[in-house]
Amino acid sequence: MTVDRRQGGLGDRHRGGAPGSELRADYETLQAMGDTGYAPTVAALLAEVLHAQGRDREAGELADAYREKASPHDVGAQYQWRSIRARLLAAEGRTGEAEELARESVRLIGTIDQPDVQGQAMAGLAEVLEAAGRGLEAEAALRDAVALFAAKGNAIAAARARRELERLEGSPANSAPAPL
């Protein structure tokens, strides 16, 4: 899945700030307070924003920090660090490792009833599969993501996933081979 690198941090675009700046400030404040409850979640959100901006080294550092602090019993946390790390590995060309982590994140989040988050996991898997040159499998993952987002009523995420799906379906690399 091609990441829209124009996406900003939560609320930043509407307030005129740099994308991710509010998340960065929140993360730094929580770290200074010694918080261990919310800081890892904010780190994961900030890692997502940084990855969308192409700042993968910084995103990786935050993903690693999140992984270290994530409770082994928190399915959401375990899904989230795997998902962002998988997409970062795919961006580095390490698609085998990336796919393994992405599929594990999908498996983990599939154990709880959160269709919106499950859709995010499928969209992350699609990004990894596309990076691996497996566009048809990426399309299938995006179809699943669209269905999950629609089931949750998340029209914005469903529309974004549909646009990615349309882009992939229109790609010559994903065309079915001509019959012999």
Image (tube, helix red, strand yellow):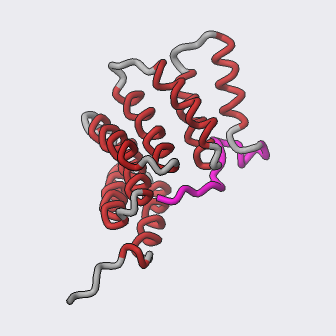
Q: Is residue 66 left or right of residue 100?
A: right
Quarter of the picture containing the C terminus is bottom left
The structure residue drawn at horizontal position 47% and vertical position 51%, both measured from the top left corner, is 93
Quarter-of-image position of residue 81: top left
Whether residue 11 is in magenta: the answer is yes
Residue segment shown in magenta: 1-17
Q: What residue is at 77 percent from the left and 42 percent from the top?
A: 17
Please state if 36 lies on the left or on the right of 78 as rendered.
right
Which residue is drawn at the image coordinates 51% and 50% (left, top)?
91
Residue in front for this viewpoint, 56 or 110: 56
Hey, which residue is sitting farthest bottom in the picture?
180
**34 above or below 84?**
above
State the image coordinates of residue 134 (x, y, percent, origin top left): 35, 62
Q: Which residue extends farthest top?
A: 34
Q: Is residue 111 magenta?
A: no
| Up-down relation of residue 19 to residue 167 (above or below) | above
Is residue 153 shown left or right of residue 53? left
User: Residue 170 location in percent, x, y?
Assistant: 43, 77
Count numbered badges in the picture: 0
Pick whichever, 151 or 32, lies toward us. 32
Task: Tell me the chief SS of the magenta region.
Answer: loop
